Amino acid sequence: MDSPEQTEANELKQEPGVKRALEACALEQQPQEQPVLKPKARRAVGVYLVILIAAGVLYYLVTLKVLVLPNRYLILSQKLSVSLLLSMVVLLLARLTRSLLYGQIGSPAARYNLKRVIDLVSALLILFIAVSVLFVNWYAAIVSLGLISLVLGLALQNPISSFFAWIYIMIRRPYKVGDRIRIGQVTGDVIELNYFDTTLWEFGGDYLSGDHPSGRIIRFTNSKVFNEYVYNYSWPLFPYLWNEIKFYVAYESDLAYVEETIKKVVEAELGEAMMRRVRVFRNVLSDTPVDELEVRERPSVIFRGNPNTWVEVVVRYVVESKESGRVKNRLFKRIIGELRQQPGKVLFPKSDMR
């Protein structure tokens, strides 16, 4: 009979994001019930319907010559009304499609990407409608567009490269909105992913040494993913990282007591729930090559000799990436405070010998 962790891991493997990650060797939330059309979507649909009806009425008024216009404006009015009518149909279908699919997608990042894709497809369809209706001579239109594309391709190489990088990001998903990443020399949380650039909420930076947000945003072109390493700290199959705390004690210290005390403090701080989650994800990793590595949910203590005549104590533990700074601060204070309660067993470097 499977253990509770194995049972939970098996359920986790059925998530769409985890399935994709396992097949490729991101943890998606369960879809939540949402109204088909939110108030904002209802208002947008209402506006589109009003414009669509108005365009249809204008077309038939002009066609049936109820609305008399000069001949030079007659054909143009018909083309504009048809173009507007079809464009409103596209926008209406795009809004309805997005609203219907939103209720089936639990991940905010996936919904964000869906919106971007639908907006892009809608824009291309509207452009196609405009060219088809306004330019009857397709050969001339294609030649004109070809020349324009050639000129723009030469002048806008970087934006075009960034657009194809956006497609690459959508397909390969090196990161998504909400992930914590490092690319090149910058590190931060992805807060926006556009067609041409990505925006990060920076943490660390020039004025901070930890992982606290710096208050600045960083925007870089998507094409950067083609020539820079992308470090993602939010991998769905294991959204944790190993962290360390280092300090020094004397050789005369009771090292067994130090190790036992540190493990007790760290386990109490992390909590059994955290260690249980790590065991669950460890079971998920059993279906990947990562299973060859040892993934411990409990903290470990390592002692190293140091040239400064003191023993270096390294505390290694697993923590959620976005909590690493706060957890490290709490653990350091609790560990030092606990060890100081037994001055006969633990000797720290003296102030004049550091």
Image: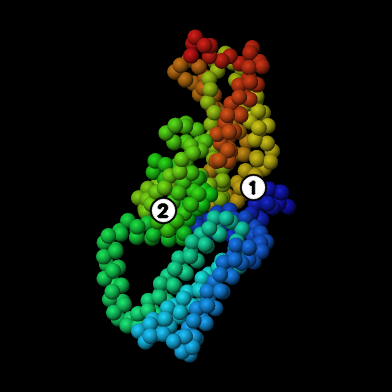
- Tag 2 secondary structure: strand
Are circles 1 and 2 on residues that touch, CB within 8 Å?
Answer: no
Say what amino acid the circle numbered 1 marks: Val
| Residue 324, horizontal then vertical, whole percent | 56, 36
Residue visible at 28% across and 76% down in the picture: 143
Within 10 Å of the Cα at label 1, are there few (<14), some (14-19), or many (20+) other Cα atoms? many
Residue visible at 56% across and 50% down in the picture: 237
| Residue 244, horizontal then vertical, whole percent | 53, 31
Residue visible at 35% across and 50% down in the picture: 227
Farthest residue toward the bottom?
Answer: 64
Farthest residue toward the right?
Answer: 1
| Residue 57, horizontal then vertical, whole percent | 52, 82
- Gap in Å between the C-alphas at discs 1 and 2? 36 Å
Of pointers 1 and 2, the one earlier in the residue sequence? 2
Residue visible at 31% across and 77% down in the picture: 141
Nearer the camera: disc 1 or disc 2: 2
Horizontally, is 1 left or right of 41 in the view? right
Horizontally, is 146 left or right of 75 in the view? left
- Tag 1 secondary structure: helix
Q: Quadrant of residue 278 in the image?
A: top right
Question: Which numbered circle lies on residue 280?
Answer: 1
Q: Which residue is mark 2?
A: 197
Q: Nearer the viewer, residue 322 or 244?
A: 322
| Vertical placement of residue 155 versus 225, above or below | below
| Vertical placement of residue 127 versus 232, above or below | below
Q: How many marks?
A: 2
Report the coloring of the rendering: rainbow
Q: Nearer the viewer, residue 53 or 172?
A: 53
Residue 271 visible: yes
| Vertical placement of residue 262 versus 167, above or below | above
